[in-house]
Image (cartoon, rainbow, N blue to C red):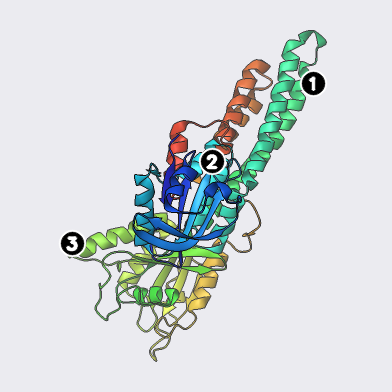
Amino acid sequence: MKTIVAIATGNINSGISIVRVSGKRAFEICQHCMKIKIADMEDRKMYLTTLDFGGVKDKSLVVKFVSPKSFTGEDIFEFHLHGGFRLAQCVVDFLISKGASLASPGEFSKRAFLNGKLSLEEAEGVIDLINAESKAELNAGYALMVGKLNKEIEAFQNELTNILAEIEVSLDYPEEDIEYIVEEQIVSKLKDILSKLIKMQYSSKTGSIIKNGLQVAIIGKPNVGKSSLLNAMLNCDRAIVTDIAGTTRDTVEGSYEYKDIKVCLWDTAGIRESDNEVEKIGIGKSIELLRTCDVILFLTDGSRNLDKEDEKIFTLLKDFKDKPIILVSNKKDLQSYSLKLKDMISEGFENSKIVEISAKENDNVLKIKEEIYNIVLGNSINLDALYITNSRHLECVNKAIKYLQQAISQVYNISLDCISLDIKNAWNSLGEITGKNITEEVITQIFEKFCLGK
């Protein structure tokens, strides 16, 4: 297998840049740029030395990791350079000229998996940890990386293996007349595993929010303050604010973190009748966003009487009553303000929360953040709990549940050797999470998500 090299710290200027080399020839190739003998270096000990990469020099730290006690399971050598990207790139170019090959995205982690240093879901946890945008997502990624899910899934697989063994015994010794007893035991054990998997499946709803954030759409007619509200909630000028109705003609997105959860806000084009083709496209996007978001903020202008445009949006919202809707009355800083929303609330919206705010003065905006969190999550987030955050893992769990349900429903109707097929399929489905039953195609897709040098 070729010896690979890449910058492990990204294409940016920073305090330190790390160039990583892995493979059988790692020490041989790296010896070309340094006078200190790599063979004399102690494993996992940092050395300060002068380096010469074909005329480009640096004085920095180096360290070696001897196989198999390394991240990839191969010999690894690292240069901890001064953090200029150009310097790091010159180092990579020099090492390639001496026989190394540029690593593909995720190739170091892929080798760690192939060499048994990293399970598949641990590798996916590394990806999640790198890409995390909230504390909850960091914790979920760490739980994957340290094998929390892997341990639970392997426990299910071990139980299924024991059940398959019991079935084999009953089939091999039919004269003992123990099949009925085995069937009773099988159903009980399969139901126990199934209930745990369904609980895990249910956790994916919260897991999706941890992974992707709460999706919140701000809707209302033009010029009620949607962009001002977005800016106030993000605490920055993300959207253009003017007195001209219809300024926002496309969705504008930003995010913030509240109680460790990422919240994605979408400022939508004002919903109204319009002859302008560009504005009509924006309005269409606004309505489409209502179908995919988790929470709807319906914003009205409390300084003016509600009109037919507000009524039309209320009518539109009746198609989305399955989603949490927060009614927001804006511009309470104006003398002409009064709460008019209660007069328009119709059947189906009686339980919708009403929040009075001034987006311009940032008054009571924190209350909206609190309502968004409580209405969807309440006290359901436990940062130490295990959640299914990965859609691939959820698909595998769903398949395992389906096979176990089939096995349980037919255990008294067909022979146990046929039941064992469903149990084996459930085992294989779970094996796609742990990596014990995975195709090369899926492995490639997973590790392609990694950045270069990881």
Q: Which residue is mark 1?
A: 181
The residues tagged by marks 3 and 1 sit, at their Cα atoms, a distance apart of: 71 Å
Is 32 situated above or below 193? below
Disc 1 is placed on an element classified as helix
Left or right, 163 with reference to 308: right
User: Who comes first in sequence, dot 3 or dot 2?
Assistant: 2
User: Who comes first in sequence, dot 3 or dot 1?
Assistant: 1
Q: Position of residue 33 (x, y in %)?
A: 42, 52
Disc 2 is placed on an element classified as loop
Q: Position of residue 229 (x, y in %)?
A: 40, 76
User: Who comes first in sequence, dot 1 or dot 2?
Assistant: 2
> Could you tell me which residue is drawn at 54 percent across and 41 percent down?
74
> Could you tell me which residue is drawn at 42 percent across and 62 percent down?
58
Q: Which residue is mark 3?
A: 277
Mark 2: amino acid: Glu
**Across the whole image, how many numbered discs are drawn on residues?**
3
Mark 1: amino acid: Ile
Labelled disc at residue 379: none
Mark 3: amino acid: Glu
Which of labels 3 and 1 is toward the front? 1
Q: Which residue is mark 2?
A: 74
The residue lying toward the viewer, choosing from 104 and 55, is 55
Can residue 196 be seen here? The reply is yes
